[in-house]
Amino acid sequence: MWKIAVDVMGADHGAMPIVQGAIAAAKARECKVLLVGDEKEIVPVLAQSGVAYGENERVEVVHCSDYIRMEESATDALKRKDSSIYIATDLVRDGKADALVSPGHSGSTMSLATLRLGRIDGVSRPAICTLMPTITDKPSMILDAGANTDCKPEYLVEFAIMGYEYARSVMGYEKDSIRVGLLANGEEESKGNELTKATFALLKGYPFFKGNVEGNDIFNGSVDVIVCDGFSGNLVLKASEGVSSSISQILKQEIKSSPLRMLGGLLLKGAFANLKKKVDYAEYGGAPLLGVKQVAIISHGKSNARAIENAVYQALRACEAKVCERIAQAFASTKG
């Protein structure tokens, strides 16, 4: 049975939604969740949910009172060995858990996962891989989405390899049809800045490389994996979240503006529900940190229970697909 260490502390809405989401995943799938955090915050939620916990149960509490606050520096986590994220990471490192899920301080999660779990041989910089909605029935992936603000062309090539392997092994995309694009300000090879131009030259030899893509290609289904530096990727991610939220609010205001529109809204209720589900970050759960030796999922700080439940599922899929081993094999073959 797979064991998932969940860092319960430090998220925007406290421990309750994190614990509830982990419980839902443990009930729905053949897995065990290790809830790492202050038992004074965790146990009441378990009692309220009527969930048994312990070493021989699907849910286990690993107590610690310290955690990294959002306003604190990521480097603080390296010294705070009694913090929830440090202990959760070491559970994976020591083989007591198979994967890590954390909606807490993302910088701390990235730093500890990189240093404590270690980088896969051949990987210069681990990257955050974020799923994005498209007009098709499958999402696209952006990496890096924020781990590395300053990149070299070689890093982006590594992101492309890791994204391709994740799309193939975890997302189940057909390996011969996976298309990887390089984010630029135009499709022509001559477009972009010095980083993208140099990266283009390196990626041309890979069969999965489609070429330069623009921002709209992230959502139109023309490409499966989009690579870029973490600065650009994070801007795209945050802008997309803002647009999605704004459109949702505008639609609600417009529907409520007249009885006729309210009637139309009722008739289209199912369509709106499907749209909301497709663009809701909670349905994707979290973003894997690719390039480390074991599975680590970074969830949004404002994650609700559904987001954490899906993050655990994502961690399980990554474990089952042996994605870290597949990425290691890909880099080993590249060296060879």
Image (tube, helix red, strand yellow):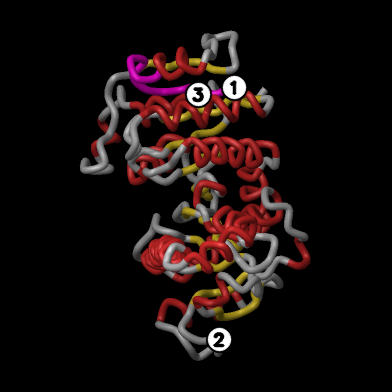
- Along the line of sight, the residue nearer the viewer: 32 or 289: 32
| Residues at marks 1 and 2, CA–CA distance in whole angstroms | 46 Å
Residue type pointed to by label 1 = Lys
Query: Residue shown at 70%/42% (left/top)?
Result: 321
For marks 1 and 2 on the same chain, the one whose residue lies earlier in the sequence: 1
- Relative placement, left or right, of 315 versus 299 is right
**Residue 274, percent across and down?**
62, 56
Q: Is residue 147 left or right of residue 26?
A: left
Q: Which stretch did the figure color magenta?
A: 32-42
Residue of label 2: 187
Which comes sooner in the sequence, label 2 or label 3?
3
Spot occupied by residue 133 in the image (x, y as percentages of width and height): 57, 62
Q: Can you tell which of label 3 and label 1 is closer to the viewer?
A: 1
Which residue is pictured at 44% across the width and 84% down the height? 192
Residue 122 appears anywhere in the view: yes
Q: Secondary structure at mark 1?
A: strand
Q: Amino acid at mark 3?
A: Asp
Quickly name the residue at label 1: 32
Three-letter code, disc 2 = Glu
Which residue is the site of mark 3? 94
Residue placed most toward the observer, 331 or 321: 321
> In the picture shown, does residue 147 fall above or below 308?
below
Decide: few, some or many residues near mark 2? Use Cα within 10 Å; few <14, some 14-19, many ≥20.
Answer: some
Image quadrant where one finds the N terminus: top right
| Residue 199 numbered mark, or none | none
**Magenta run includes residue 35:** yes
